[in-house]
Image (spheres, rainbow, N blue to C red):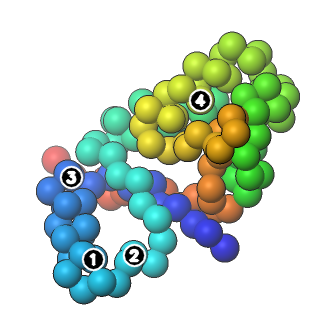
Amino acid sequence: MKTVVLEVRSPEESMANFAQSWKTGKPERSARISFATPELLWQVLTAKRWELLKALCGAGPISIREAARRVERDVKAVHSDITALLNAGVLDRAEGGGIVFPFEAVKVEFLLEAA
């Protein structure tokens, strides 16, 4: 199963991890999409966008209209959410048009610590 980990990590931590993978030649066990703060994660992954990701998991390339149909929402509103997810690097454009979320599972990781 192809899994993506959505996580909260500083840019420095992400680059250090990338450098380690580059040096060793060993890739991460799963794909990762990092956000600098929990607030940024929740700003990008609103409840409606999370619902959209659930509908796109394992679906392969689909049109925005089909995505809107699957979540039973207005095409214009779904288009706006898809644009935000594309800009954040969560979704990809599919060859031949449409969009794709190339994962079958999503794992969210972050740690909440005392101030």
Alpha carbon of mark 4 to alpha carbon of mark 2: how far? 26 Å
- Determine whether the residue tagged by mark 2 lies in a helix, strand or loop: loop
Does residue 102 appear to the left or right of 66 in the view shown?
Answer: left
Residue identifier under label 1: 21
**106 is higher (above) or lower (below) than 49:** below
| Amino acid type, callout 1 | Ser
**44 is higher (above) or lower (below) than 108:** above
Residue identifier under label 2: 28
Number of residues whose C-alpha sits closer than 10 Å to that of mark 2, classed few (under 14), some (14–19) or many (20 or more): few
- Determine whether the residue tagged by mark 1 lies in a helix, strand or loop: helix
Along the polypeptide, which appears first: circle 3 or circle 4?
Answer: 3
Alpha carbon of mark 3 to alpha carbon of mark 4: how far? 25 Å
| Amino acid type, callout 4 | Ile
Along the polypeptide, which appears first: circle 4 or circle 1?
Answer: 1
Alpha carbon of mark 2 to alpha carbon of mark 3: how far? 17 Å
Q: Is residue 53 visible?
A: no
Alpha carbon of mark 1 to alpha carbon of mark 3: how far? 17 Å
